[in-house]
Amino acid sequence: TGTTVGIHDLSFATTEFVLPHTALAEYNGTPIGKYHTGIGQRSMSVPAADEDIVTLGAAAAAPIVARHGADGIRTLVFATESSIDQAKAAGVYVHSLLGLPSATRVVELKQACYGATAALQFALGLIHRDPSQKVLVVASDVSKYELDSPGEATQGAAAVAMLVTADPALVRIEDPSGLFTADVMDFWRPNYRDAALVDGQESIGAYLQAVQGTWKDYSEQGGRPLEDFSAFCYHQPFTKMAYKAHRHLLNSAGHDTDEAVVERALGRTTGYNAVIGNSYTASVYLGLAALLDGAEDLDGQTVGFLSYGSGSVAEFFAGTVVPGYREHLRTEAHRAAIERRQPIGYDRYRELHEWGFPTDGGDHPTPAGTTGPFRLAGIGGHKRIYEKR
Ligand code: CAA
């Protein structure tokens, strides 16, 4: 259609608490090098009992609505794999907390960590159809594995909100996309569990297979050559995974893996993920946030996005950074969201990990914890009760 479409604004929120990996390592006897160097993680965001995907999602999206107003937002797509209801979309609560107009369509999307990219692609399609519309994409997740499991060190939580529009101020998203789907059981969460099940090494292999598959399809669809890209935002279940993935992409495309080139392509995308942990659907867009918020001017540069969701579905696509984007960033607010987290020790983390509403179907208030703008006040009559603070 000739219309440019993409990400007009991006804002993220994370949790009240943070657990440094040094505290986990001290508790379980793991050499800290395994966490800091081996998986590339420094700390993990830990939600208060009264924080969840809704409160985080609303906190991420509120500054976007404050800056642009709700005018023109006719669709809100909420992507998550840590859903809080089997029927109702979490986005409906966010719609209400943000006071969006009733003339809005709201839906929740799920395909593990890939969901936010599906949401973004659907948003782009809607905007191509009617460039006067805006779509609010909210990606929000709490990553939870069993205590004392190998996945535990890769937990985290955050939400990214993106306003997707025509003539965007931050990143123009391009066609084509490279696509890949394979039915694998590398990571999943049955309905009766709140912690995910994962086959760690299998999941790394499945991710690498998906990287190769999406790049192959992207090339066959007439995508850009590797040389065009100045940086790559990968899904980062832990930051070192992006390095494994990029080396695999380069090798499978017949390129050498010069470590300086790999570092140049990825190093600017890992800053937020290293201190927040895995935020599942939000992770790849936290990578973009870190890249944009960094010191370097990216005017006109091309960025590759590799979104992977276990199970598995992956997509590779390109975006170009819009000249002048720096005037529209939220770098200060993003750094503040990370710095405002209160450090907790292992015992408090364990308590929060084990906390959950009693499953008796009764009414229960939530213990107070968050100092964020929204909280889950409790459950009453089987309904989750949210409030503005
Ligand atoms: N100093 C430095 N490095 C060390 C070290 C030390 N003392 N000890 C170990 N290491 C290194 C290891 O060599 C290894 O690095 P390489 O992979 O480069 O060889 C790294 O630290 C991790 O060590 P292990 O592989 O032994 O770790 P593990 O098996 O205990 O756990 C994990 C790793 C499997 C990723 C685990 O954290 C896990 O299960 N995580 C959850 C699943 C996951 O994140 N999978 C990623 C792909 S799936 C996906 O992307 C979707 C999603 O979001 C879940």
Image: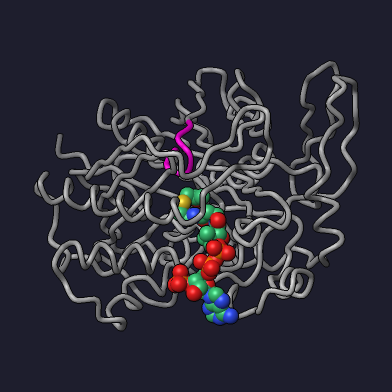
Residue in the foreground of this view, choosing between 146 and 118: 146
Q: Position of residue 348 (x, y in %)?
A: 86, 59
x and y, in percent, of residue 271 in the image = 51, 70
Residue 314 in view, yes or no: yes
Q: Main secondary structure of the magenta part?
A: loop
Identify whether 340 is placed above or below 376: below
**Which residue is most to the bottom?**
260
State the image coordinates of residue 50 (x, y, percent, origin top left).
80, 42
113 drawn magenta: yes
State which region is magenta. Answer: 110-115
Compared across the picture, whether 339 is left or right of 1 comes to: right
Image position of 226 with respect to 47: above or below: below
The answer to whether residue 273 shows anywhere in this view is no
Q: 233 and 36: which one is in front? A: 36
Residue at the (43%, 63%) spot, across then down? 241
Quadrant for the C terminus, please: top right
Q: Is residue 128 left or right of residue 150?
A: left
120 within the magenta span: no
The residue lying at 47 percent from left, 36 percent from top is 136
Quarter of the picture containing the N terminus is: top left
Quick check: 375 left or right of 272? Answer: right
Q: In this picture, is 101 found above or below 273?
A: above
**Quadrant of res 30:** bottom right
| Residue 388 sits in quarter | top right
Q: Residue 279, how many percent across, how many down?
A: 56, 51
